Every structure is written in structure tokens, then in C-alpha cells.
Image (cartoon, rainbow, N blue to C red):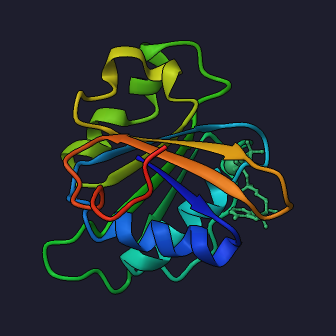
Amino acid sequence: MTREVHSVEETWALAREVAATLKPGDVVCLEGDLGAGKTTFTQGLAKALGVSGRVTSPTFCIVQEHRAERAAPGAPALLVHMDLYRLHGEDDVIAIGWEDYLAEGAVVVVEWPERAGSLIPQDALHLEFRHMEGDENRAIRLCGGNFGIMNGANEA
Ligand SMILES: Nc1ncnc2c1ncn2[C@@H]1O[C@H](COP(=O)(O)OP(=O)(O)OP(=O)(O)O)[C@@H](O)[C@H]1O
Ligand SMILES: [Mg+2]
């Protein structure tokens, strides 16, 4: 399914819908050009999960951990945001704590997921962000995952 959004607020609203479906140990892969909205989307996820700190791009530190002060019962209490651009393969990804984070029940949000190869689980949710004409317009394609947000979306 593809959802079109027309503002940062609409991207955050989509993130809120996605967040409501996330369980501890889920992996969310974000793809798309520079400035397409991957980090902005992650800010929305974090807020919806009860994280109050600021979410910035993990580009220079590879991994950022965001703990929810106010996680709903049963909802993930840790959001881990990774930018794997500078890593070279699965061993590197394991070295930064991949398996430990998932075992701990984090939601792991991954930019440049191709670096993680077969570590990405089959049931990961994939979102692909694309610029559209107009400053704030984006097309966001969602696939995979076991998510109940596929209904009511405009197909493309
Ligand atoms: N609908 C929208 N959704 C998300 N961001 C938007 C939207 N409209 C405008 N923007 C702006 O576009 C920029 C998106 O930047 P962001 O850091 O989220 O992109 P990114 O995909 O993470 O890029 P990078 O690959 O450089 O990390 C922000 O400045 C944001 O304010
Ligand atoms: Mg980013």
C-alpha cells in the first residue's frame, strides 16, 4: 500500500498508526532518498511510543537508543534507531548489539537495512519514502509486517 502525505504532521500521523501496531522485537526498515522523511517518521514513532527525548539522525553515531518514559502496558519500551550506512556487513551489525536489542524487546528502526542482510526478519515492516512534487508531499510505501494499517489506504 502507498500513502500520500502532504505535511510533516501527516507523516507523524502515519507514524502514530504504525506505532500502534508495533510489538516488542519488531523491525522497521526505512528506505528512501536524503531528506525524504525517514528521521521525521522515526520522530513520530518515538513520540507515539512515549519517548520524550529528541530524535535526531543517527548518521554519525550509528545507533541511538530512545527509552519510553511512558510506555503503554505490553507496548515496546525501547526504540533503537540505527543508520547502518557506514557498516559493512552482518558481523558489524551484530557487533553494535542487534541481537541483544531484539532479545530485550526493543523496536528496531533501521536506515540502510540492506547492510544487515539476512539479519532482517521476514516479517519486518518496510517503508519506502519518495519525494513528490511540492515541498511537503511524500509518497510512503508500506509492505511486509503483520500490520493492521493496510486497510483504508489509497492503493498505488
Ligand atoms: N511530509 C513530510 N514528511 C517528512 N518530512 C517532511 C515532510 N515535508 C517536509 N519535510 C521536511 O523534509 C525533511 C526530512 O528530513 P529527514 O531528516 O526526516 O529525512 P531523512 O529521510 O531521514 O534523510 P537522510 O537520508 O538525510 O537521513 C525535514 O526537514 C522535514 O521538515
Ligand atoms: Mg535520516
Task: Tell me what residue is drawn at x 23 percent, y 54 percent.
Answer: 147
Residue 43 or 96: which is nearer the viewer?
Answer: 43
Task: Tell me what residue is drawn at x 29 percent, y 55 percent.
Answer: 150
Residue 5 or 25: which is nearer the viewer?
Answer: 5
The answer to which quarter of the image holds residue 105 is: bottom left
The answer to which quarter of the image holds residue 72 is: bottom left
Residue 112 or 145: which is nearer the viewer?
Answer: 145
> On the picture, is 72 further left or further right than 2?
left
Q: Whole-percent x and y of residue 16? A: 42, 73
The answer to which quarter of the image holds residue 116 is: top left
Q: Is residue 13 above or below residue 62?
A: below
Q: Whole-percent x and y of residue 131? A: 75, 47
> On the picture, is 7 further left or further right than 147?
right
Q: Whole-percent x and y of residue 124? A: 30, 38
Q: Is residue 52 above or below residue 39?
A: below
Residue 85 or 128: which is nearer the viewer?
Answer: 128
Residue found farthest to the front: 155
Residue found farthest to the left: 74
Q: Whole-percent x and y of residue 113? A: 49, 29
> On the picture, is 146 further left or further right than 96?
left
Task: Tell me what residue is drawn at x 65 percent, y 37 percent.
Answer: 32
Q: Is residue 24 above or below residue 59?
A: below
Task: Tell me what residue is drawn at x 62 percent, y 50 percent.
Answer: 139
